[in-house]
Image: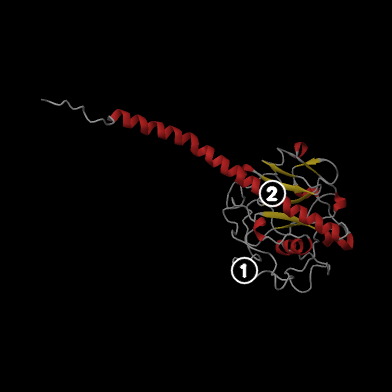
Amino acid sequence: MRHSTSPRESFTLVELLTVIAIIGILAAILIPVVGKVRENAQRASDLANIRSIGQAALVYAHEHNGSLPPTNLPAAAGTVGFIPTGTTATTTLYAYAAALALSGGLNNGAVWVSPADLVGTQGLATILDNARPRGFSSGTPAFDGATLSFQAFSGLRTSMGPNTPVVWTRGLAAATGDWDNDRQNSVYGSDGGHVFFLGGNVQFFDSLGPDDANGRLVAVNGNRTRQILTSAPVITGPSAWQTPRVLSSTGAGTGTGLAHNTPATGAP
């Protein structure tokens, strides 16, 4: 008696090519979506971090008669503490962060670095040394000298108004209100960055406006502006050194952005 056998089931070449094509189409659709989800998650993390920095600065101001970290903090954390002395602009971004750690309760160095930052120093721990609470931590990587993802104004006071920027994403250009296109200089390239204001709000901007007339910031004179430097006042006379100044970390690429110690240009 003969037993019939069915032919072995297998995919034909056409079927295999069809499956491969479908997988390719799905990958082309899903990969950008996954990338966008990750980018949104990174921006949400940055928003939370810059809000923490800004709120710590406001806590500092509450304890220092309305003054946020001033322009003349000691250049390095140490036993002298952070009481303003002298008549020159000496504040670094690290001293600013140390002041917030000491008087603002923010001793986590990691909040100063975006996970999306291609050149930022990842893996930072505490800012101040637990054994020497007025000195920088000796951990590796060290906070003092690290490349940080944010910039800040020193020398602000809460009386300067709620629309005054306090902290922003590194790489913002002075005149154009745009972030540098180079991801080595700007965390998100030309996509934009976050800005935290004295009023306590934080916002992501793709740019600060196409021109000053349509700027998204408010200058000291009350006009619209896209130039962040005009949003903080110039101090004149013997106290001119107290004019708010831009703080940036050592070695941080800013490209066309704002260099460390750039003074504000708003009307006196």
In the displayed structure, does residue 236 sit left or right of residue 49? right
As rendered, which of 243 and 13 lies closer to the eye? 13
Point out which mark residue 17 bears: none
Q: What amino acid is labelled 1 in the image?
A: Gly
Q: In which quarter of the image is residue 240?
A: bottom right
> In the rendered image, which residue does mark 2 sit on?
48
Residue 163, image x and y in percent?
Answer: 81, 45
| Residue 196 seen in this snapshot | yes
Picture residue at 63% right of the left edge, 58% below the top: 252
Q: Identify the amino acid type marked 2.
A: Ala
As drawn, is 195 to the left or to the right of 23?
Answer: right
The answer to whether residue 180 is above or below residue 69 is above
Which residue corresponds to the image point at 26% horizontal and 30% vertical from the top-left?
9
Left or right: 218 in relation to 42: right
Q: Mark 1 points at which residue?
A: 139
Residue at (70, 73) in percent of width and height: 131
- Whether 108 is drawn above or below 17: the answer is below
Q: Is residue 198 above or below residue 102?
A: above
Residue 170, percent across and down? 66, 52
